Amino acid sequence: MKIGKLREVTLTGSRYQIGKQAGEGAADVIHRMVRQHHKERLSRKDDAFKSALHRLEKNTLQIAPEFLEEIDGIADGCGLPFEEILAYNCLTEMVGVPVGGCTNFAFADTEVGPAIAKTNDGDTPGLDWFYLIERIYHNDGRGLLIVTWAGTVWLVAGVNSHGLAITGASCDGTEENWDGLPTNMLTRLALERCRSVEEAVPLLSGTPITLHSMNITLADSGGALVVLEKSPTDCALRRPKNSAIFCVNHFLTPGMFARNNNYGREYLENSERRQRHLTEVLFRPDTEHSVKKMEEILKDGKSPGAVCQLGQENFYTALAAILLPKPKVMKVVLGPPCEGEFQEYRL
């Protein structure tokens, strides 16, 4: 087994200071992402690109102005222009980066309370070098523990000091709303502003997003657990069955199913295989609702529809995490979970 080491940064102070420390702490990775990995996508200077970026900046100023303060700090911290870091944070909207084959599943009643498991997948093996762990401590005492892309105001997964945990799985759809927040900022916004699932669901439901639909899984230390299916124009809430729930890369509720687009048949078939696999595994009467069982499911790379992906339809799992909101812990493995070991991170 290999053990991939995630870079860890601790961020404190004002939103600008938090961003500046984040930029300084991962400047090399941010430069590589913006100036090398996405150079051609983010170096456009045409009027359409500038107009779209200006609109997204205006939307963010109206909905989450604190994120622009943080992006300003990231830019100063890593030594790149504000416009480049903003465009990087609006990557999906600006350049249409394909969504991955991410998966979430959760139990409401493990030995440590609710727990959410999550994979993050990409279309190329080895895309794990830009993830980092951030511990964020605000001046008002709020704290967050997140795994995220270096240089962004996003989160891949996270828990906060109130005992709220949140993560998601991308969905492709045909709808757009160019008065919305850049979609990848939405889950971080909820973790920043909310103390519970009860508070987070209205915020997530009521905040407009631009494009890049998603399934969002939430749990809290009080025992609440839900999946919110969210598109730029609609949303639907799903609750656990027998204390278990999951989401993949398409919508499951009847009212949202018609909004699935999913990049073509192969993408949808991959998502549907994981749906069938999790339906079978999670809802068997003898399935143990434990953190150990969640690790076991994440580490399975061989079963049909396994969530650890090793090239199926060109998807490769780059990271997996288990979120434990009650103890405020994340267990994370960098790279395919079937090839690595989980490391524990605490707020």
Image: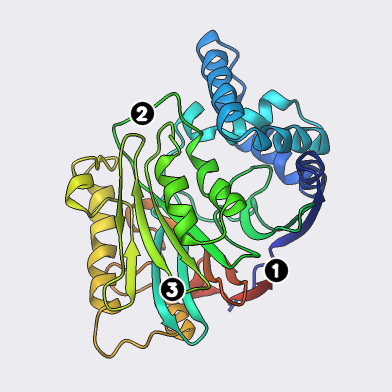
Instruction: Check whether the beta carbons of the residues at disc 2 and disc 1 lie within 8 A of each other.
Output: no
**Depth-wise, is mark 3 or mark 1 nearer the camera?**
1
- Label 2 and label 1: CA atoms lie apart by 36 Å
Circle 2 residues within 10 Å: few <14, some 14–19, many ≥20: some
Q: Amino acid at mark 3?
A: Leu
Considering the image in quadrants, where does the N terminus appear? bottom right
The mark found on residue 298 in the picture is 3
Residue 129 in the image: above or below residue 45: below
Picture coordinates of residue 46 (x, y %)? 55, 10
* Sooner in the amino-acid sequence: mark 2 or mark 1: 2
Residue 291 in the image: above or below residue 34: below
Tell me which residue sits at (51%, 44%) in the image: 186
Tell me which residue sits at (47%, 30%) in the image: 93
Answer left or right for 36 relative to 16.
Answer: left
The mark found on residue 347 in the picture is 1
Residue 230 in the image: above or below residue 243: above
Kindly indicate the quadrant of the structure image that contains residue 207. top left
Answer left or right for 252 relative to 63.
Answer: left
Picture coordinates of residue 157 (x, y %)? 55, 59
- For numbered disc 1, what is the local secondary structure? loop
Picture coordinates of residue 270 (x, y %)? 28, 56
Answer left or right for 2 relative to 314.
Answer: right
Kindly indicate the quadrant of the structure image that contains residue 178. top left
Residue 39, visible in the rendered structure: no
Picture coordinates of residue 346 (x, y %)? 69, 72
Which residue is the site of mark 2?
Answer: 176
- For numbered disc 3, what is the local secondary structure? helix
Q: Amino acid at mark 1?
A: Leu
